[in-house]
Image (tube, rainbow, N blue to C red):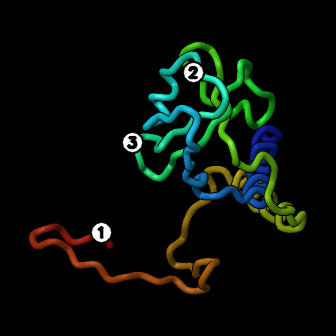
Amino acid sequence: MRRCASTAVRAAAAAALAVALPAAAAQATPATSGTEFATTAELMAASNLSGTVYTTGDETADDGAGMSYTITDTLPDGIEGNIAVPLADGTWAVPQGLPTAPTRASNSTQVEDLIARGESFYDAGTALVWDSSRPTPLTGTVYTVPRRRPTGSPAPPS
């Protein structure tokens, strides 16, 4: 069990430090040719597409998440296969312009530190308890904001 969790922690740490993906893909700007769909759902329901297609949004039209896609007959290997959109006729729409590899080098010292921290939490298990009387590791002090009770509510336990 520890080995699986350790592997998961290591993979998550490496991914977190090595890959800096943009928050959202750049808004696709349709060319004069190519098919355009309002949403990804509309694209998924389409058949008999080829070349490059576009969406103006993801969940709703013009929601800022429009993309361009290349239509392929087979599911691509690797990360592109993980993000390809299946279409109604069994073909695939592969997003264009997304990074398929880390955009910066990882710092092995930071990765090892992150892994060690994650493993320490796993090792602590249910013994890991927050103690509000101790300073936090980020600020060195405990900061609390006084809260007012609503009128008529019981006092908090002491």
The reply, left or right, for residue 133 in relation to residue 20 is: left
Relative to 77, does residue 126 appear above or below in the rendering?
A: below
Q: Position of residue 27 (x, y in %)?
A: 55, 52
Q: Earlier in the sequence, mark 1 or mark 3?
A: 3
Quick check: 153 left or right of 80? left
Q: Which residue is mark 3?
A: 60
Identify the mark nearer the N-term, 2 or 3: 3
Mark 1 vs 2, N-terminal side: 2
Q: Amino acid at mark 2?
A: Leu
Query: What kind of residue is marked 3?
Result: Thr
Quadrant for the N terminus in the image: top right
What is the secondary structure assignment of the residue under circle 3?
A: loop
User: Is the residue 21 above or below the residue 95 in the image?
Assistant: below
At 83% from the left and 61% from the top, the residue drawn is 111
Image quadrant of residue 135? Answer: bottom right
Q: Nearer the viewer, mark 1 or mark 3?
A: 3
| Extreme-right residue of the structure | 108
Density class for disc 3 (Cα within 10 Å; few <14, some 14-19, many ≥20) is: some
Number of marks present in the image shown: 3
Question: CB of mark 1 within 8 Å of CB of mark 2?
Answer: no
Judge by depth and name the residue closer to the eye, 48 or 41: 48
Residue closest to the eye, 84 or 132:
84
At 59% from the left and 22% from the top, the residue drawn is: 49
Residue 87 tag number: 2
Front residue of 150 and 100? 100
